[in-house]
Image: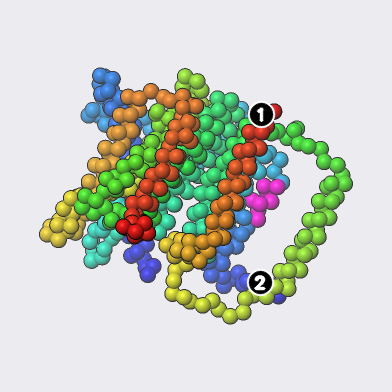
Amino acid sequence: MIHIPDLAHATTVQVIFCFLAFITIATAFMTIFSRNPIHSAIYLVICFFSIAGHYLLLNAQFLAIVHIIVYSGAIMILFLFTIMLMNLNERHQVHRPRITRLGAIVSFCLILIVLIAIFINSKPIVGGYDSTGEDFQSIKVLGKILLNEYMVPFEFASILLLVAMIGTVLLSKKEKLK
Amino acid sequence: MVDSAFILEKSVVIVVVFAVTMIMAMYSTWAERKVAAFLQDRVGPNRAGWGGLLQPLADGLKLFSKEEFFPNTPNRFLFVVGPAIAMSTALMTSAVIPWGDRLHLFGRDILLQATDINIALLYFFGVVSVGVYGIMIGGWASNNKFSLMGAVRAASQMVSYEVAMGLSMIALLMMTGTLSLKEISEQQAGMNWNVFYQPLSFLIFLICAFAETNRTPFDLAECESELIGGYHTEYSSMKMGFYLFAEYANMFISATIISVLFFGGYNYPGMQWMVENVGVNTANILGIAVLFAKICFWIFFYMWVRWTIPRFRYDQLMNLGWRILIPLSIANIIVTGIVILRHDLAAFLGF
């Protein structure tokens, strides 16, 4: 069942969480609804910042700051950059036929139903977490675990990124050759 | 843990750090003019106060009393947000910098740092990477081609040099083994300054710091001969002041980071002896003075370079960043790794 928190007796963390969640959802919606692509991108940046706030609430400092550096600091800047250079305006918007819009609405509703069903039927984790005495938020422990126990998946992820990067460079070079 | 005295102590530290950053940024504008005047054999500001010392106040007053001009833009809100972001990000980094070790006042140890987080250096990179938004949003919202060009130049320059800056830091971090600026300062006690162990890393960091603060020789974002005023062409009054002030605050902060990371921070030779024989407070006040002397030297260095070296061309800037600095810092990482693991490697190869 869904547990509705008691707002009158909410702890500080819960209040902050509600505030952050509100910002996250509001800006995520504004990202989709705003007509101006630059405004969309800026809303998405605010959304990413609030998600970093969620990470901080979970005491995941490293994840929060890396999230800011990678998403807000690099990816979204490149996004903004591209949008500014492309000079997208409202009148350049592609006309979508009615059947596509209808399909989008139907699929959205279906996904919504599935998600609500999942959330209603999901059960919270039974039992507490084991305390191992190690601070898994500190980068020292995190780095040791990533490069010892999970060395192979970690390296695979970096190879995946490298391949993606080389692929992008190749694609852009190909267009130039033509 | 969190008692009222703790909150009061931290508040005082934060307010003092904020005030000092502002004052340093203010007097950097005065110092810049004096240094420029000295290098060009002029006198420089000398009317307001002794040696022109009141000149920054007069400038502030002038900027406040100027007309607030808004260009014909559909994004008035973003037009105001631009300088606000630039200013906030310029002031945020000072939270993690250790200004000194500790003072012993009112029967308690006061750490001279707003907060000591174990991701301090990453926090610094995060704030720097967010700082691009101030310039980009402001330049775009100005609704002016020259502003947009300046903003796009600034953004691509800062994103490119962040990569080299991060890679040059990795070599240093492999040696220190920590991201906390306090621990990095403590490791450099005596004359164990990191610059002696990582000179290449320091050089790359210095060049990237110039590019990140948009200072000459990398000030292509506001290159007057091509772009009028760059991203702040349309700005006037105090909004313009905020952009210029943010530049000086950034300069102060990056000078501080350079001093803390590579030049021992608040450490000076014989600090341990001073702590034991003279007293904690005297030793640490001297430490703060030493840190500020280092910072002032680096601010002077920024100005020295600005009035000595001409501006780069844009393709030269990009070539330097991507083709020289990044491979150089990767080579530096490899060499550092080999030196750190030299005993294991020797054992592996059978020596």
Residue A93 sits in quarter: top right
Q: Earlier in the sequence, mark 2 or mark 1?
A: 2
Whether marks 2 and 1 lie on the same chain: yes
Q: Which mark is residue A4?
A: 2
Q: Position of residue A34 (x, y in %)?
A: 69, 43
Furthest residue toward bottom: A127
Residue in the image at 57% along x and 47% along y: A162
User: Which chain is disc 1 placed on?
Assistant: A
Q: What residue type is labelled 1?
A: Leu
Task: Please say whether residue B189 is visible from this viewpoint.
Answer: yes
Q: Where is residue B151 in the image (x, y as percent from the top left)?
A: 53, 32
Q: Quadrant of the C terminus of chain B?
A: bottom left
Residue in the image at 29% along x and 51% along y: B99
How many numbered badges does the structure rendering display?
2
Say what secondary structure mark 2 lies in.
loop
Furthest residue toward right: A99
Q: What stretch is highlighted in magenta?
A: A25-32
